[in-house]
Image (cartoon, grey):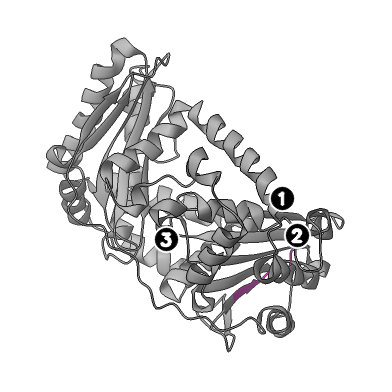
Amino acid sequence: MVGSDFLTHTLKNGIRLIHQQTDSAVGHLGVLINTGSRDEAQEEHGLAHFIEHSVFKGTKKRRAYHVLSRIEDVGGELNAYTTKEETTLYSTFLSQDYERAAELLSDILFNSVYPQKEINREKEVIAEEINSYKDSPSDLIFDEFEELVFDGHPIARNILGTSENISKFNRNSILGFIEKNYHTDQMVVSSVGNMKFEKLVKYIEKYFGSAETKLRTNGRKPFENYVPGTRTEVKGTFQTHCVLGNIAYDVKHPSRIVLVLLNNIIGGPAMNSRLNLALRERKGLAYNIESGYAAYTDTGLFNVYFGTDKENYEKALTLVKKEFKMLRDSKLGDVQLSKAKKQLLGQIAVSTESHDDLMLAIGKSYLLYNRVDPLNEVFRKIGAITSDNLLEVANEILGESKMSILVYH
């Protein structure tokens, strides 16, 4: 038991299971692996994401079509994604098909054969994905910003890789990366659905318990020695696109939750975020304006993005910096602080209503921290944040001399 709502079990090979019981007719099951693009060597750039695509291309007992049809034939969905630090395979299905989903996820994770013909076809698919991405400057700029901030470090590289690198991948590349990075003590099976825990444990033991024990001994190269940088690129875009930001707290830093709240105040999803009001609502300078905070194992990244007409760029950038300065210089009043907390609490509560998102969230928390805080504990931590805490974090993260800036003109 991790919290009042979550049940856990650890297999002999180190794979962990976390489950939340619901009365929904729909179940959600995922496998989260603590391996992503930052775990690649330079010549492997793009391989973690390539494996996530290729894992569906056939197993020892199923062709690619049968992998997809196994869950889709009963109205379910099968999906996957890769981040800098994780690879996740997951499925959504009717609760009566829990065992079918567990068996399928196990089969593609442990028994995929990666036929060379399918690999060659997938290279073309990913090449098109890369080209599509290059056509979207508002997406591309985030990757290039991370390259600027984390210059020369594995975490700097984008997830998709390069067409040149991907053209060299083969079955041996895939199997070598899996052997080196897919460790059973770095895997979590996460479940949210209408399934008795004892029965779910039997399914997971049956389909995941026989996997060979592999424990992680290799660590990640830490990121150090951040140097703020500024770069402008001529892209010939209609708008000027800008990202500015700074390194931030890692996943276990005690001030992480404070920065989550500060980020929400600055440019969170609500229309009344400070930057949305300052640039869009009051001045009409931007359609898209947002801030983000990503926490990694040993570092983090805070950034702000906006797109604006070329003639409004300097004005928009000045307004962003002005908001940062106000947060560095002035404490939030009690009413402002209370409103900011209530907004974040509400957003978190609403997000847990999506059982798909909840399954991924509790899986990630269990993978990283070996625990999941129940909602009331999350609320308590947010409630304990003071205006002094916010001021301290604003001065640490939002200092103008610490900012890196990337601009597309």
Residue 350 in sight here: no
- The image shows residue 48 at horizontal and vertical percentages of 52, 56
Callout 2, which amino acid? Gly
Give the label, 3 or 1, closer to the camera: 1
- The range drawn in magenta is 18-24
- Give the numbered dot on residue 39: 3
Comes first in the chain, label 3 or label 1 = 3
Residue hosting label 1: 118
| Direction bottom: furthest residue | 12
Residue hosting label 2: 58
Residue 238 in sight here: yes
Q: Does the magenta stretch include residue 218?
A: no
In the foreground, 43 or 5: 43
- Give the numbered dot on residue 298: none
Q: Distance between the residues labelled 1 and 2?
A: 9 Å
- The image shows residue 298 at horizontal and vertical percentages of 30, 62
> Image point 38% across, 16% down: which residue?
284
Disc 1 and disc 2 in contact, CB within 8 angstroms = yes
Mark 2 Cα-neighbour bin, 10 Å: few <14, some 14–19, many ≥20: many
Callout 3: SS = helix
In the foreground, 110 or 88: 110
Callout 1, which amino acid? Glu
Comes first in the chain, label 1 or label 2 = 2
In the foreground, 15 or 130: 130
Q: Quadrant of residue 256 in the image?
A: bottom left
